[in-house]
Amino acid sequence: MDEGTGLKPTGGRYLTNIPMPEPLYRNTSRNYPNFNMNIPDQFRATQFIDEIETLYRKPGKDLPRLLFIHLPDDHVTKPRPEDGYPLASSYVADNDYALGRITEYLSHSPWWSDMAIFVTEDDAQGGVDHVDSHRTVMMVAGPYAKPGYVAHNNSSFPGMLKTVFKSLGLPPLNLFDAAATDLSECFTSTPDFRPYTVLPADKAIFDPARAREPMDPKPAPRMDDPRELKRQHDAK
């Protein structure tokens, strides 16, 4: 995949087209950036909030029961002081602040009273500690999440999926999900509907105002339209 500049809005161009099942295609954003460390997670947060406002909140439509979002900048890469990333850890700060903005937005939305947010890493490659190299962060947020609670049961990705499936009234997909320990201990029957307020970023580590929007001197071809790709090819 090309992760260069000028790839707004999706953030990358794949050199091989892979067919996508129609239900997934129909329910996938065309404007949310893929993995590209040249694109700030602030841009992703803004895109997500704008799409929810445009597609659901303003028209008064129901929010989909499941939303999947990735914020990849805590993968970290080389510092780019000119773009607001003076340190490698600046990318983590970018990631944290984007997650905070999204959580703040959702907690002020009309759907918050029935919402649960699950946050984890895609893998634990940077989380090696004195206990186990497979350990990673997992957080739960929402009105029914126990405030300040630290879970002690051993859970896993299948455990998180199992919790999501049970919340949606769906059966497990396989034996791994069925046998996993879910995250039920993280929830309470006494809700707290107070919204979340994001804290400002430490500008010495990451300045959101300096995190440049992806450069895009001209509109990129629609990667989901073969006719547009052919026109672009013929124009060359």
Image (tube, grey):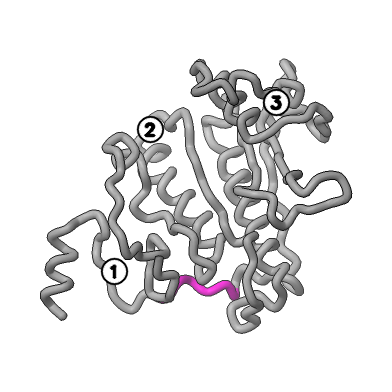
Query: Callout 1: 10 Å neighbours few (<14), some, many (20+)?
Result: some
Q: Quadrant of the C terminus?
A: bottom left
Please tell me which residue is depicted at 44% across the width and 58% down the height of the picture: 33
Q: Are marks 2 and 1 in contact (CB under 8 Å)?
A: no
Q: Quadrant of the N terminus?
A: bottom left
Mark 3 → mark 2, Cα distance in angstroms: 32 Å
Please tell me which residue is depicted at 64% across the width and 66% down the height of the picture: 76
Looking at the rendered structure, the secondary structure element under dot 2 is: loop
- Residue 134 picture location, percent across and down: 73, 45
The tag earlier along the polypeptide, 2 or 1, is 2
- The residue to which callout 3 is attached is 183
Using the rendered view, name the quadrant where residue 149 is placed: top right
Q: Nearer the viewer, mark 3 or mark 2?
A: 3
Query: Callout 3: 10 Å neighbours few (<14), some, many (20+)?
Result: some
Magenta stretch?
A: 210-215
Query: Callout 2: 10 Å neighbours few (<14), some, many (20+)?
Result: few
Kind of residue at disc 3: Leu
The tag earlier along the polypeptide, 3 or 1, is 3
Would you say 68 lies left or right of 209 here?
A: left
- The residue to which callout 1 is attached is 220
- Residue 45 picture location, percent across and down: 53, 54
Considering the whole magenta stretch, tell me its main secondary structure.
loop
Residue 110 covered by magenta stretch: no
**Against 12, is 21 above or below?**
above
Would you say 173 lies left or right of 75 here?
A: left
As rendered, which of 89 and 62 lies closer to the eye?
Answer: 89
As rendered, which of 57 and 18 lies closer to the eye?
Answer: 18
- Residue 114 picture location, percent across and down: 57, 24
Mark 2 → mark 1, Cα distance in angstroms: 31 Å
Tell me the tag on residue 60.
2
